[in-house]
Amino acid sequence: MGCKYSVGWRDFRELFKGLEVEGNPKFREHLNKYDVIYLNMQQFLIGAKHREITEYLEEEVLEEIREEYGEFLKRQDIGLADALRRIYAKTERIFIFLIDEWDCVMRERQDSEELQKQYLDFLRNLLKDQPYVALAYMTGILPVKKYGVHSALNMFTEYSMVDQGVFEEYTGFTEAEVKALCSQYQMNFEEVSSWYDGYELINFQHVYNPKSVVEAMRRGRCSNYWTATETYEALKRYINMNLDGLRDEIVKMLGRESVPVRTGKFKNDMCNLQTKDDVLTLLVHLGYLAYDSVRERVFIPNNEIMREFENAISDDGWENVMKIIVDSECLLQNTLEGRADEVAAAFDCAHT
């Protein structure tokens, strides 16, 4: 079994022993009935180097499939979809596909539209209306890529940061979970909340960034953990496009306001950004903005992300905005410490 793909049979009863799913009537009906093909697209993209990713993927996966079903695959030049169709015709075996980071091609090959189309065509041929597919489950940051108004993979039900559906409570940690963790690790809940809360969904009004909460519990202090895994240069690039007056909207959100957004026209990639709404919608999917689907507005969710935005605008012509932010922080501190003269001087300066 490779780390990129796995085909074969194992008895998984022990894995689910004592869990709620074990009591489901369909549990035994489906247990150990399917081979699983797991594809980590990030690893394939790295491994392909200068080759076409789909060609490299087929070659690697077929090598392992032949170990299990080689007797049915006499041709050496057969493709992956054709091989699986032949296996199904001979054995009636059906497969579950788990595809992790499906969208890494869209994120890391932004300038190659030809490669993106080829990749989507490959996935459509592999998965759409194929008799050997029992289930295909894909994870990634971006929803399925659109060309025009259509999707090449329209057989999927999508759950995203714009519409989480039944998976709301699994988007991040819930408030109850974070309170329990704070009690267990002796952390101040209010401080943790100000740092990592803010993703307000329809049924769960308080959803926390799990990566950051885990790091805060492990290290015993709140800091910027999740955004440290990304480069804020990407955020700067989108903001500095200033499409349709985007900078004005960023300034409003830095002031703790929300701004309207239309998410429907976003093409689900990181290069075809034509309007302010495209950029704001992308920032929602990347986790930099929270989305209120009822009011259709976006906002900066918490202190962690607020600091990332402040880092992103610390230069490139944002000096006046940064001065306002610094002055506001000083005013707040002087107010809390009862420094009347400094507070009066700040208000006088603001009025002037």
Image (cartoon, rainbow, N blue to C red):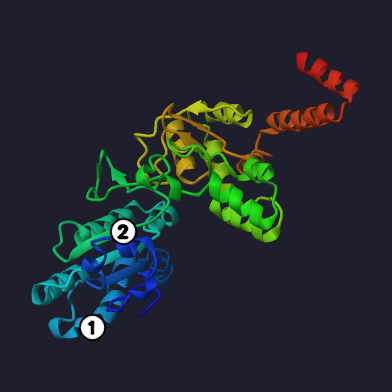
Decide if residue 166 is in sight here.
yes
On screen, 321 above or below 23?
above
| Mark 1 in CB contact with mark 2 (< 8 angstroms) | no
Q: Measuring from the top left, give residue 278's x and y in whole percent.
A: 42, 36
Alpha-carbon span between mark 1 and mark 2:
23 Å
255, above or below 153, in the image: above
User: Where residue 6 appears, x then y in whole percent?
Assistant: 32, 75
Residue 293 coordinates in the image, percent (x, y): 42, 32
**Farthest residue, direction left:** 89
Identify the element where label 2 is drawn.
strand
Q: Residue furthest top?
A: 352
In this rendering, the answer to whether 20 lies above or below 144 is below
Q: Residue at x 61, y 54 (%)?
A: 181
- Residue 193, placed above or below residue 250: below
- Residue placed at 34% from the left, 34% from the top? 264
Inspect the image, locate mark 2, and give the three-letter code of the amino acid beneath it. Answer: Tyr
Q: Amino acid at mark 1?
A: Glu
Instruction: Please give the name of the residue rendered at 71% of the width and 53% of the height, measured from the top-left corner.
Output: 221
Label 2 crowd bin: few (<14), some (14–19), many (20+), radius 10 Å: few
Task: Name the residue nearer the viewer: 241 or 39.
Answer: 39
Q: Which mark is residue 137?
A: 2
Sequence-wise, the earlier of marks 1 and 2 is 1
Task: Locate the C terminus by quadrant.
Answer: top right
Q: Classify residue 116 by image quadrant.
A: bottom left
Q: Position of residue 292 (x, y in %)?
A: 46, 32
Q: Is residue 325 left or right of residue 304?
A: right
Q: Which residue is mark 1?
A: 68
Residue in front for this viewpoint, 189 or 263:
189
